[in-house]
Each structure stands twice: as C-alpha cells, then as structure tokens.
Image (spheres, rainbow, N blue to C red):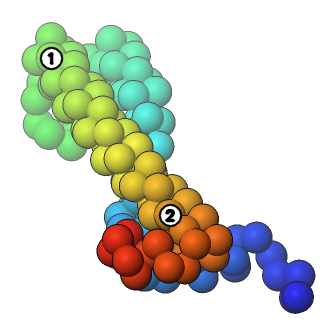
C-alpha cells in the first residue's frame, strides 16, 4: 500500500462530488472574508469621525455628511453580517454532506459491497 498524503486521498474520495467540494471551499473562503471585513469597517468609521468631510467614504462615495457616512458604514456592516451567516450556513451544510457521502462511500463501499448495490446507497 502506498503512503500518500492524506489530502490527496481525501481529494480522490471527493472526486465524484467535485462541484459540492468546490462550493464548500468557496463558501468557507467567502465566510472568512465577511468575518474579517468588519474590522476594516471599524477603521473606516474611526476615519469618518476624525476626518469628517475628508474621510475615505467621502472621497469614494461623495457623501459629505459624517452622520450619513456612519449610517452607510452601519448598513455595510449589517449586510456583511447577513452574508457571513449565509455563507456559514452554506459551508456547514456542504461540508456535512460531503462528510456523510465520504463515510457512506468508505464504510459501505469497502465493508459491505453487497449492501451498496442491493439497497442503492451509492
């Protein structure tokens, strides 16, 4: 038996579910990005308070009123929290589904070959 890297073995087992695997990876990355961005928005909010009409938001969006800029940052924060929750839900469902498929393929496919064909598990 060859000693291959565990990640290569995992990718071999997920080959039939490649699309779901890619979606799970993308959802994980997008969730982490949405998790990091609120810290950047806190820095932008501090920039609005300190620089007011000369802040980054004022330069990029053209909004001059500091209160409106802060509302804008607040709305972006809420949108990012919602997106983070959606992506977290997606990656949890996708990774659990892949783990279930992997367990079914390895346990029933190797231990009980008659069960997979008889009951249509795979």
Q: Locate residue 85: give its quadrant.
A: top left
- Residue positioned 82% across, 81% down in the render: 4
- Residue 15: which numbered mark, if any? none
Indicate the quadrant where residue 48 lies.
Answer: top left
Residue 11 visible to the viewer: no
Q: Quadrant of residue 68?
A: top left
Neighbor class of circle 2 (other Cα within 10 Å; few <14, some 14-19, many 20+) is some
Task: Name the front one of labels 1 and 2.
Answer: 2
Q: Residue furthest bottom?
A: 2
Image spot of residue 52 (x, y percent): 26, 17
- Identify the residue shown where x is 33% and y is 74%: 120
Image quadrant holding the N terminus, namely bottom right
Mark 2 element type: helix
> In the figure, 70 relative to 103: above or below?
above
- The residue that label 1 is drawn on is 71
Q: Nearer the viewer, residue 81 or 71?
A: 81
Number of marks in picture: 2
Q: Earlier in the sequence, mark 1 or mark 2?
A: 1
Q: Name the residue under label 2.
A: 104
Whether residue 3 sits left or right of residue 57 in the image: it is: right
- Mark 1, Cα crowd under 10 Å, few <14 / some 14-19 / many 20+, is few
Judged from the image, the secondary structure of the residue bearing numbered disc 1 is: helix
Q: Viewer-proximal residue, 72 or 65?
A: 72
């Amino acid at each position: 038996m060859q000693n291959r890297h565990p990640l290569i073995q995992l990718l071999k087992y997920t080959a039939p579910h490649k699309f779901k695997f890619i979606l799970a990876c993308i959802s994980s990355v997008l969730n982490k990005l949405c998790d990091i961005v609120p810290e950047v928005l806190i820095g932008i909010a501090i920039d609005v308070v300190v620089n007011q009409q000369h802040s980054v938001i004022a330069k990029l969006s053209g909004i001059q009123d500091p209160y409106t800029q802060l509302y804008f940052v607040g709305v972006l924060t809420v949108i990012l929290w919602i997106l983070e929750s959606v992506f977290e839900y997606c990656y949890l469902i996708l990774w659990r589904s892949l783990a279930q498929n992997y367990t079914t393929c390895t346990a029933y496919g190797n231990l009980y070959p008659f069960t997979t064909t008889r009951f249509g598990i795979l």
